[in-house]
Image: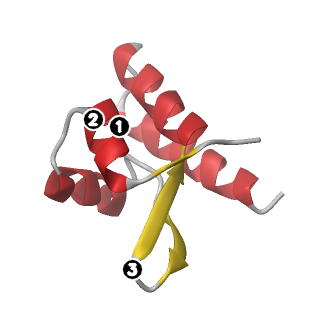
Amino acid sequence: MTALLRLPSVIQRVGLKRTAIYERVGLGLLPAPIKLGPRASVWPEHEIDTCNDAVIQGRTPEEIKALVLQLQAQRSG
């Protein structure tokens, strides 16, 4: 079972503030959150960890964008 992270946990794991996280989502450098309701969004923990690992490994923005697309495609099975 995949753990789901709320925004405060994502902020802590990524080390960025809310605005910067959503900017990166908009640029395709972080996966978009999953909406659970009108005021509730979550991210799969493994997606955030995978993106963090890519940054640590020195992947280019283009490589990270491709990774994010792959992660989001896997959500639908």
Q: Is residue 23 left or right of residue 71?
A: left
Hey, what amino acid is under mark 2?
Answer: Gln
**Residue 42 picture location, percent across and down:** 49, 59
Q: Which mark is residue 12?
A: 2
Dot 3 or dot 2, earlier in sequence: 2
Residue 25: where, in percent of width, then height?
35, 57
* Circle 1 crowding by C-alpha within 10 Å: few under 14, some 14–19, many from 20: some
**Which label's residue is closer to the chain start, 1 or 3?**
3
| Amino acid marked by disc 1 | Pro
Give the image quarter of residue 61: top left
Say if 34 sits above or below 54 in the image: below
The circle on residue 42 is: none
Q: Residue furthest top?
A: 57
Residue 11 horizontal side relative to residue 71, left or right: left
Instruction: Name the residue that disc number 3 marks.
Output: 39
Left or right relative to 56: residue 66? right
Nearer the observer, 59 or 39: 39
Q: Residues within 10 Å of mark 2 (few under 14, many from 20)?
A: few
Q: Residues within 10 Å of mark 3 (few under 14, many from 20)?
A: few
Instruction: Measure how far apart labels 2 and 1 are at the Cα level.
Output: 21 Å
What kind of element bears circle 3? loop
Q: Dividing the image into 4 quarters, which one contains the C terminus?
A: bottom right
| Residue 61 tag number | 1
Looking at the rendered structure, the secondary structure element under dot 2 is helix
Residue 23: % across, % down: 23, 58
Of the residues under marks 2 and 1, which one precedes in the sequence? 2
Q: Residue at x 47, y 53 (%)?
A: 31
Residue 65 sits in quarter: top left
Determine the residue positioned at 44% across, 86% down: 38
- Name the image quarter holding the N terminus: top right
Residue 59 drawn above or below residue 29: above
